[in-house]
Amino acid sequence: MNLLALLLSLSLFSCKKNDNGTPANNQVPTVQLSDVTQLRKTADVSVRFYVTVSASSFTKPISVTYATQEGTAKQGKDFVAANGTLTIQPGSSQAYVDVTVKGDSLRQNDLQFYLQFSNAQNALLSATKSTATILNGDNSYLPTANDGYSTPGTYPGYSLAWTDEFNGSALDTKVWNTELGNNNGWGNHELECYTGRPQNVFLSNGNLVIEARKESYEGFNYTSARLTTQNKKTFTFGRIDIRAKLPVLKGMWPAIWALGSNISTVSWPECGEIDIMELVGQTPGTVFGTAHWKNANNGHSYKGGQQALTSGDFSQNFHVFSILWEKDSIQWLVDDKPYYKATKDIVDGIYPFNNPFFFLLNVAVGGDWPGNPDGTTQFPQRMFVDYVRVFQKN
């Protein structure tokens, strides 16, 4: 064969068509699969799986069969099962499969299910399945067991001056403020950024929930919430009961406390601080009650006590953290058991605790006292508050 005949033969061979309608010198079209993410809604919603053909042109229809497959998301509960055959006609490069995600308001871990592909005709599959991730972490319903200690709604010789039972659908902004940011670690080298987002503070099932998360937000790696009643609800003296279930892992620092209402004029610690309850993660079965004040040398002094459970920790059940606050004295209790009392004679300066105070509720992450979270600290972490009640003597 001469050179001209050889070149002609090669030219004819290069233009030959394959049975699937693509040129022989091109690869068989490839079907590309995509993963999808869907925010969970209270009502059913469709999640769309896109299927794309890599080739710019093809002459025969491409078909592939599909079927849903359970993962952590379950058929019937989290999604509606689907199966069938998907066809992509020549002249088109993309098709899709819609699968129904069931409506739900439960705040829980994200869930996954899959769309399994097989039996590709006139094409190759780049993978055999796509993954759908259902995002549940921002949902509004978060029940928790109500087991634990509870206190009565009335006491002899007292009247109920104020309560928040957290039975509504949203935080009462006429009572509560949400403090924001990190404020240079709040004086304790804390790691969280406080927000007022529903991701970090919300009401559910009769409880206030403060949720600490590990996430990147405004330059910080953790978020949480810090509430106050400053300039809205202040009290002087009485019995204060706060029923709560606490986060207890390494680096967690939940607190229920009060500051003197004159803090904006005299600053801290002169205004006084009453820590009704603090817990640090390294001692999950122990809570602390403390009084802070400005001493005679213009410094900071404090005294307090601690109460430990006989078994378990403070995340397992609700407990009631109380103070009996009278003129010149404060007594701390857990589940009606007194464990520390501070009187005026312990203060080596101006006694601030006969003045009005406002409440604070927060969950700090890290800081000088609890230290930082480590690999054992699973997020999110939550403090549930069932009620805040203030009783005053008749």
Image (cartoon, rainbow, N blue to C red):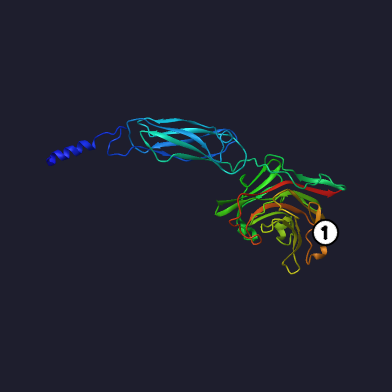
Seen from this angle, which residue lies furthest left?
Answer: 2
Residue drawn at (61%, 41%) of the image: 139
Instruction: Note whether 218 is above or below 297 in the view shown.
Output: above
In this rendering, does residue 282 appear at all?
Answer: yes
Disc 1 residue type (three-letter): Ser
Residue 151 relative to residue 41: left or right: right
The image position of residue 233, as x and y in percent, is: 74, 49
Residue identified by numbered label 1: 329
Furthest-bottom residue in view? 297
What is the x, y in percent for residue 134?
Answer: 55, 40
Could you say which is closer to the camera, residue 11 or residue 150? 11
Looking at the picture, tell me which residue is in the foreground, 11 or 325. Answer: 11
Check the image and report above or below for 296 versus 126. Answer: below
All told, the count of numbered labels is 1
Q: Position of residue 28 (x, y in %)?
A: 33, 37
Question: Would residue 158 be found to the left or right of residue 278 on screen?
Answer: right
Where 342 sits versus 317, above or below?
Answer: below
In this rendering, does residue 233 appear at all?
A: no
Q: Residue at x 51, y 37 (%)?
A: 69
Look at the picture and state if 3 lies above or below 358: above
Foreground: 323 or 68?
Answer: 68
Bin the neighbour count of mark 1 within 10 Å (Cα to Cα): few under 14, some 14-19, many 20 and up: some
Q: Secondary structure at mark 1?
A: strand
Q: Is residue 121 left or right of residue 254?
A: left
In the rendered image, the quadrant that contains the N terminus is: top left
| Percent coordinates x, y for residue 46 in the rendering | 52, 33
